[in-house]
Image (cartoon, helix red, strand yellow):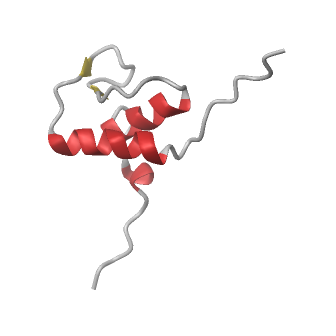
Amino acid sequence: MDEARPPLRAIAPHGSPYDRGDADAYYGRRFRPHKWLDDMGVEEATDLSVEEIEAYTAGFDDNPSGRKPWGDAD
């Protein structure tokens, strides 16, 4: 029997490709698959595996954090 799996966002650690995809979508940044190698994003990697690119894409497309409200343009 298959156990229910938690949403990917719930198990994706900070800095992971999924997390970075979600963050890029949240801030309206361009699609640029990467992951952080440290907790602060000082070191990042762009040479990702196919699975990591798929995870970034899922985070970017799912965008569970929504979009950043930048306020009124007025």
Q: Residue at x 59, y 41 (%)?
A: 66
Apparent side of residue 46 relative to residue 59 in the rendered image (left or right): left
Residue 65 on image: x %, y %:
56, 41
Task: Indicate the quadrant where residue 14 lies.
Answer: top left
Q: Quadrant of the C terminus?
A: top right
Q: Residue at x 29, y 79 (%)?
A: 2
Residue 16 on image: x %, y %:
32, 36
Q: Residue at x 36, y 31 (%)?
A: 15
Q: Residue furthest right?
A: 74
Residue 62 on image: x %, y %:
46, 48
56 or 15, nearer to the observer:
56
Residue 30 on image: x %, y %:
43, 24
Apparent side of residue 11 relative to residue 50 in the rendered image (left or right): right
Give above or below for 74 relative to 65: above
Q: Residue at x 39, y 32 (%)?
A: 20
39 or 31, nearer to the observer:
31
